[in-house]
Image (cartoon, grey):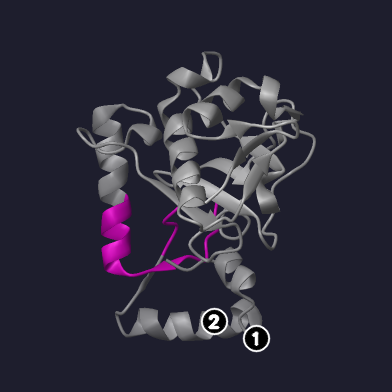
Amino acid sequence: MVTRGAVAAEGVEGGFSAAYRVLSAFEESGQARRGYVVEGLGAAQFAMDGAVDRLRAVSTARDRAAAPAFDGPRGQSPRAFVLASADTANAYGAALPWPDPPTGASHRPGRKAGAMVVLVDGELTLYMERGGKTLLAWPSGEAEAASPEDDTRLWTAVEALAESARAGSLGSVTVERVNGAQALSSPIGKLLESAGFHPTPRGLRLRP
């Protein structure tokens, strides 16, 4: 699926007007359809039939299950992906706006060099600055007032982040602050320790 925001994020030569001509030709030849596919992304959206069908199927399944998005399809565990924040597979900051900073945080995420995101079933759950010094975490809606240990989506994201660090994908990571608080005293810091991060004078560290 292609939107104005996605084209702008990719820096396509000629901008959206140039891409629009090509996409319109795809529509006329039956290779794509134009419509209001995803709410909030504007009217100029183009998608292949298969993409529209998959989005409709996911929406229908969620309505029937009446379950939070991070629970994933019924009977399956949540799926987490660790990506560079500027990766084209990360829609936040491109086709989708970044969410407001978590409670207590004083800065916003961005598509910055070295920064990473962890998406759980497509939802932004963790944002880590280069080197891990600062970590932003978005608890799931239902678990926001509960203990982070009970937040399935958050725990899945922390495990994925730790696995990437151990695999050497992130280098040495030292988390000093989480949502504006000292990592060592943050409730989310307990999740990091459970996932393999070790306390140091500076914060919580995990090396490859």
Residue 152 magenta-drawn? no
Which amino acid type is shown beneath numbered disc 1? Gly
Residue in front for this viewpoint, 76 or 69: 76
Instruction: Report whether 68 appears left or right of 113.
Output: left
Residue under circle 1? Answer: 14
Q: Is mark 1 on a helix, strand or loop?
A: loop
For the residues bearing labels 2 and 1, Cβ distance under 8 angstroms: yes
The magenta span reads 35-55
Q: How crowded is mark 2: few (under 14 residues within 10 Å), some or many (20 or more)?
A: some
Residue at 23% x, 37% y is: 76
Q: Is residue 39 among what the camera can see?
A: no
For residue 19, the mark is 2
Q: Is residue 120 among what the camera can see?
A: yes
Residue at 63% x, 47% y is: 173
* 155 relative to 34, above or below: above
Residue in front for this viewpoint, 205 or 111: 205
**x, y (%) of residue 162?**
49, 42
